[in-house]
Image: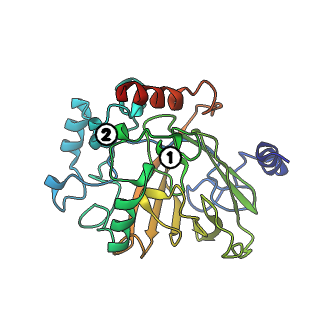
Amino acid sequence: MSRLTLVVLLFSIHVEAGAQSAGSDETPRTSWGTPDFRGVYINSTVTPLERQLDLGNKEFYTEAELEELQSSGLLLWRPEYERDQLTVESSPVWLEPGPLSRRTSLITGPTGRIPPLTPDAEERRATAGGVAGTRWMTDRADSHEDRPWSERCLRLETGGPPMIPFPIVGYLQIFQTPDHVVLLPEENHDFRIISLDERPHVNRGIRLWRGDSRGQWDGDTLVIETANFSGKGGFSGSGAGLQLTERLTWGDANTVLYEFTVADPETWTEPWTAEMPLWRSSNQLYEHACHEGNYSLPLALNGARAQER
């Protein structure tokens, strides 16, 4: 059975998709009573993951500051990529930036920044080849294994876990049944099928690129715990010991708040948390065929050989 067939089956088990039962509040609810997250969302924002250093401990912009930033068209997203011309996604012609929230960074807390790496993580990053190494991407072209996971269509960070905003193909679709939630990001269509039936995680010896996810309801919040990561293609340099907690909660009629907490004592000196909005959209999700017409690998490698000559 293909993944697409499985998702269709999950979605069609309950033909009352879209039905909502009237509750005591304004939270959209399924016919079986849980908050209803089903639909398509914009998973993109120009609010940066980490706070700019000159903002100090300023966690929110004022309304006036936000209006000025929006009117100026200033994009705060990942300015470090401007230094790497081979990262084609940084070109403005590719970008579909989402709104700018009042947050100065997606990471919450006083610093708004990722905590320092542990000594072991520093050593991993310094000695790792290709993707996690210290060389700029323009220098990573000895072989196809030097090129990043996304360029090889193996793993795209936007779909997670955790989900990270990226101003290209920034849509997400959520399916629900009483026993499962399915998260389908637009980029690469990496289905995450999350069980809600309290089954335990798979054996700790089974390690997966995207980990093993289990969900449960905490009141009106969907809590997703993910473990059993392999450490390959890890999130922002994370290792196999990563423990991830994600939370989905309705903020208002058109916004779901997505929060994730990262705990990996082998990589960071302390856990850290980020929060971002998912905006409801009336658009549809279309196929994203990463490998189709993907000439990035041969062109990058051929270009590197030409430079060497």
Q: Is disc 2 surrounded by few (<14), some (14 to 19) or many (20+) residues within 10 Å? A: some
Quarter the C terminus occupies: top left
Residue shown at 53% from the left, 28% from the top: 298
Residue topped by disc 1: 158
**Gap in Å between the C-alphas at discs 1 and 2?**
16 Å
Q: Are marks 1 and 2 in contact (CB under 8 Å)?
A: no
Tell me the amino acid under the disc marked 2. Tyr
Work out whether 91 lies above or below 222.
above
Q: Quadrant of residue 100?
A: top left
Q: Is disc 1 surrounded by few (<14), some (14 to 19) or many (20+) residues within 10 Å? A: many
Residue shown at 40% from the left, 65% from the top: 124
Residue topped by disc 2: 81
Residue 132 location (% of width, % of height): 41, 54
Q: Is residue 203 visible?
A: yes
- Badge number at residue 266: none
Residue shown at 30% from the left, 67% from the top: 115
Residue 262 location (% of width, % of height): 45, 67
Q: Is residue 277 left or right of residue 180?
A: left
Q: Is residue 166 left or right of residue 78?
A: right
- Whichever of labels 1 and 2 marks the residue nearer the N terminus, that label is 2
